[in-house]
Image (cartoon, coloured by chain):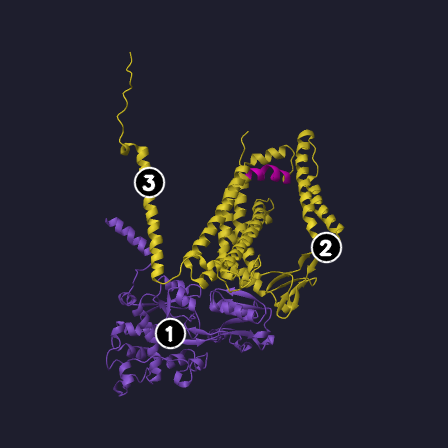
Chain colours: A yellow, B purple
Amino acid sequence: MSSPVKPSAPPVKFWRDPAKRALLFQLVLLCAVAAFIAFIVNNTLNNLSTRGITTGFGFLDDPAGFAIAQSLIPYAETDTYGRTFVVGLLNTLLVSFLGIIGATLLGFVIGVARLSPNWLIARLASAYVELFRNIPLLLQMFFWYFAVLRTLPGPRDSLSLNDSVFLNVRGLYLPEPIPGSGFIWIWPALLLALVLAFWLVRFNHRRQDATGQRLPVWSISLGLVILLPGLTFLALGAPLEWNYPELRGFNFRGGMTIIPEFLALWLSLTVYTAAFIAEIVRSGIQAISHGQTEAAHALGIKDSLTLRLVIIPQALRVIIPPLTSQYLNLTKNSSLATAIGYPDLVSVFAGTTLNQTGQAIEVIAITMLVYLSISLAVSFFMNWFNSRMALVER
Amino acid sequence: MTGKGKAALLVAASLMAGTLQAATLDEVKQRGVLKCGVNSGLPGFSNPDDKGVWKGLDVDLCRGIAAAVFNDDGKVQYIPLNAKERLTALQSGEIDVLSRNTTWTSSRDTELGVNFAGINYYDGQGFLINKSLGVSSAKELDGAAICIQSGTTTELNVADYFRRNGIGYSAVVFDTSEQTVQGLEAGRCDVLTSDLSQLYALRIKLSKPDEAVALPEVISKEPLGPSVRQGDDQWFNIVKWTHFAMVNAEELGLTKDNVDGMKSSENPDVRRLLGLEADFGKGMGLDKDWAYRIIKLVGNYGEIFDANVGQDSPLKIERGLNALWTEGGLQYAPPVR
């Protein structure tokens, strides 16, 4: 005999149920935060309008009317404030990207050199790290800009190489390539070479797995990538002309110009961040048990291959997360550009545009959003890369 | 509302600084000091001397306001601002008055919540160049690299001028006027452009001032003057009339030294300005001897001009447009009556 109906527990009042109660509190908190934000926004708009300050994003369509020293896209004074934003953003991305590449290369070399058995090399590397990570970045920027680059000669006494490359206090002047007709075929040739090289690497892997033999795949690929487009170029009759810089009037005209503000910013970001990356690389390598090296040596693998095939791949797992932080730091630090007049986003948009339009809240909001997006994108990419490199358990 | 709720609202309100209709005069009196935004270093206009005391034409206007409000021209806190910061500092209430060679333009006056309270220096934009380049006119500057201070009307005028004349230039833009001078000296640019008054002031900062020369072209009008936030007419009037009192004083021949003796003057204009007949301070919430205090403690417009930028200063700038209207210049103040 069993009772047909289970004595159901008396219905719990919803405020006694921890799960529901938690939900309720979260809802209340959310409403409070939303109300707070609404209040701030409303109050701000009220205050702005009582003070006669124009608001809105309409200013982005107004003509800017000021010049910018370096832009990756065509820009003239008659273009809009919206375009100054793009110019500034691209300049920020350019210097951050090149800075990340430079700092990574230099940082890896210094980090590995610090562990070198050669006394002199190891000491030089530690001296580098201690020197550059302990001096504030702003001072380093001033050093490169005022102490180093400003000592270069004026345009009339430029240092020149072969009368086509010039270096003076106004920057570095290079010949600019002007592609002729038919030059466009170089790109398919390059693409083909890359595909072939990729296929070759995979083929080499399979062949090594099957037979144990290896091809000198790197030299073959390199040859492919250089030769194929190169031969196409010659076959087309070398359709490329150079626009050489020339001293006319006050300055050099023609060619490409790399402005000293860019050089100073790029150098200081690279040198400064490389010191931190070097330490990350060193700690990553030291995190790998020395037994790994000994085991590799016992198998008769030589030093350079041990480092490349055994140590670095394992060390990368330790290196990548803190490396991400350094990349983010470098990107954000590039905003110090304004101190030496490099036209980055902060200088052009959050500086000049803000000042000419007076739209402080809108401009700062946009700028913050941009830095947030860049940081999240870098972080997202590095996390993806990290999960690829993470130890795959077999 | 609970105490906590009130506190939260207060915090929220203070995030967007200030209350809606701020009575700046009361705030300043309560604080006991005037917050005056000035240039961070421009000889003749606002520059700390070797003892750290701020001196200059724009600084003297701040002292004039303090004299009118407190009867003490020392009750001023000077807040040095660069061109980019100045208007935001005024908008956000960080300063009570901006007295920092700022050009009066329509957009600043109508869109930024700012009121310009007169013109204490009529200026125009020019070019400073090394003599050795052998340039005699701005029209020959095709292709030159030009050092400019960012966030100024200068930056816009130079673009207009080169476009109008169909010539090119490359802009080298810095945050402060100090940096533009360094840029010129290091050869980063061929030319420095700025308001003429600034060019005179910056030239004496060069290591060899005689090698630099100003080109004859004046490419813009630059009416420079103090400004206040919109929405407080009383405070606007005080700043406006501080300048006018100085100009009127010069016209009436009142100086720092003779102002006490002139109290016995029979001239009704003098008697009204000095508050001996009727009370013209009460409309502004000031004592009736407000103008007397300004003249006694700071001086008349001609005096402060000569001492800071004119014949008695290293700059030796001619009065020119800044002479009184009675002398063929543009300085003209409405009468006190």
- Percent x, y for residue B265? 27, 87
List the residue tagged with mark 1: B118
- A202 sits left or right of A141 in the view: right
Residue A205 is marked as: none
Task: Name the quadrant of the N terminus of chain A.
Answer: top left
- Percent x, y for residue B168? 59, 68
- Percent x, y for residue B282? 24, 74
Are discs 2 and 3 less than 8 Å apart at CB? no
**Element type at mark 3:** helix
Q: Real-space Cα distance between discs 2 and 3?
A: 67 Å
Which residue type does callout 3 highlight?
Leu
Q: Earlier in the sequence, mark 2 or mark 3?
A: 3
Whether residue A302 is situated above or below residue B309 in the rendered picture = above
Which residue type does callout 2 highlight?
Pro
List the residue tagged with mark 3: A27
* Subunit of label 3: A
- Percent x, y for residue A119? 59, 47
**Element type at mark 1:** loop
- The answer to whether one can see residue B186 in this image is no
Front position in the image: A103 or B7? B7
List the residue tagged with mark 2: A239
* Subunit of label 2: A
